[in-house]
Amino acid sequence: MASPASAPLAAHALFHTHDLDEARERVASIFCPHRLDRIGPGAFDASHHHLRGERLSLNYISYGAKTLIAPGELRDFYLLQMPVSGAASIRNGADSYVSDQWRAAVLNPHHATTMIWDETCRQVLLQIDRAALNAHLAGLIAGRPDRALTFTGALDLSSPRGAALKALLLYLVAEADAGRPSLQPGSLLGRQIESTLMTGLLEAHRHNFTDALSHSRGHAPLPRMVRQAEDYMLAHVDQPIAIEDVAQAVGVSARTLQLAFRRFRDTTPMAFLRDARLDRADADLRAALPGDSVTEIATRWGFGHFGRFAGIYRARFGCTPRQTLQDALADKFVS
């Protein structure tokens, strides 16, 4: 077992402790509240090193003992876990697999997670802000994701793209250990590296936008009528508009506009408008105050069928609108 002083990112140590409660609290301050229990061999000897970037962070964690870690849903971030020694059993939603030096784990924030790290498990972790990764994906597929980005299974680090991502991560760790950290908030180089890491993850691992990502390469430039239609719908997102209104505003037939959206956005104009309204409803739910209700917010953004609203909201954001509202109100109560 490597000592904290010789472990990856040692110059960015957050803590080193033999106290399980302290380790739980200190790790939670960077990630999220979670259950942490020693359940097997090894002396509990926890270390966490943390290098913060603008949209993501590099981390190193070891516990020294066999541990059970159960954070539930991460909610705000994706987490790539890459063992440099040992192994971990992972359950993330319906996925269950073993992560080791040849297979990394990618935890979806909208699925509950439970893990068991063996006593020799030492990991480099890449924490990526959920909103940032979704925005980066939108830029790559030239359109807003219409459902929660969901990775599947273990990430094969022996594949060409998996190996390239691993090499880049280890290079960044080595540079930080040499006193040349590239991930620094406000750094243009750091921001470019963060974008490269996000692209690398999206290309290296299977997810529900893999086909759209492949299809987006080599697309023709987006037609002006599509850009104008999107601008019109966003400007009138709070008003009752139909496909005919949008088509008239940009000077084409409804059929022509539908075909253009299908070809260049792989969606329809009305689906684009629905997603824009869902984004506004989600923002209002997250900013809700005592007395606000899901029904009121859904109606505000044109969703009259509340059961259907709850279904499409969950498909896009990975939780129900009621859960988002309750979490927002709970956060305000605690603060």
Image: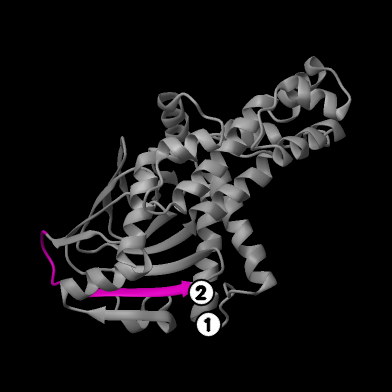
The percent position of residue 296, horizontal first and vertical second, equals: 45, 38
Q: Quadrant of residue 320?
A: top left
Tell me the distance, in whole angstroms, between the alpha carbons under discs 2 and 1.
6 Å
Check disc 2: other Cα within 10 Å, few if <14, some if 14-19, many if 20+.
Answer: some
For the residues bearing labels 2 and 1, Cβ distance under 8 angstroms: yes
In this rendering, would 253 be left or right of 51?
A: right
Instruction: State the mark number for residue 174.
Output: 2
Callout 1 amino acid = Ala
Q: Residue extending furthest top?
A: 255
Q: Residue at x 87, y 22 (%)?
A: 252
Height in image: 209 above or below 170? above
Front residue (pair 180, 252): 252
Q: Residue at x 59, y 35 (%)?
A: 275
Instruction: State the mark number for residue 178.
Output: 1
Front residue (pair 198, 34): 34
Q: Residue at x 41, y 62 (%)?
A: 125
Q: Which residues are magenta?
A: 39-51
The percent position of residue 211, horizontal first and vertical second, equals: 59, 31
Quadrant for the C terminus, please. Answer: bottom left
Whether residue 160 is visible to the viewer of this picture, yes or no, is no
Callout 2 amino acid = Ala
Q: Residue extending furthest front?
A: 291
Label 1 residue SS: loop
Label 2 residue SS: helix
Height in image: 5 above or below 310? below
Front residue (pair 180, 129): 129
Query: Is residue 49 located in the magenta-colored stretch of the structure?
Result: yes
Q: Residue extending furthest left?
A: 40
Q: Residue extending furthest right?
A: 251
Whether residue 282 is visible to the viewer of this picture, yes or no, is yes
The percent position of residue 16, horizontal first and vertical second, equals: 27, 80
Figure coloring: one colour
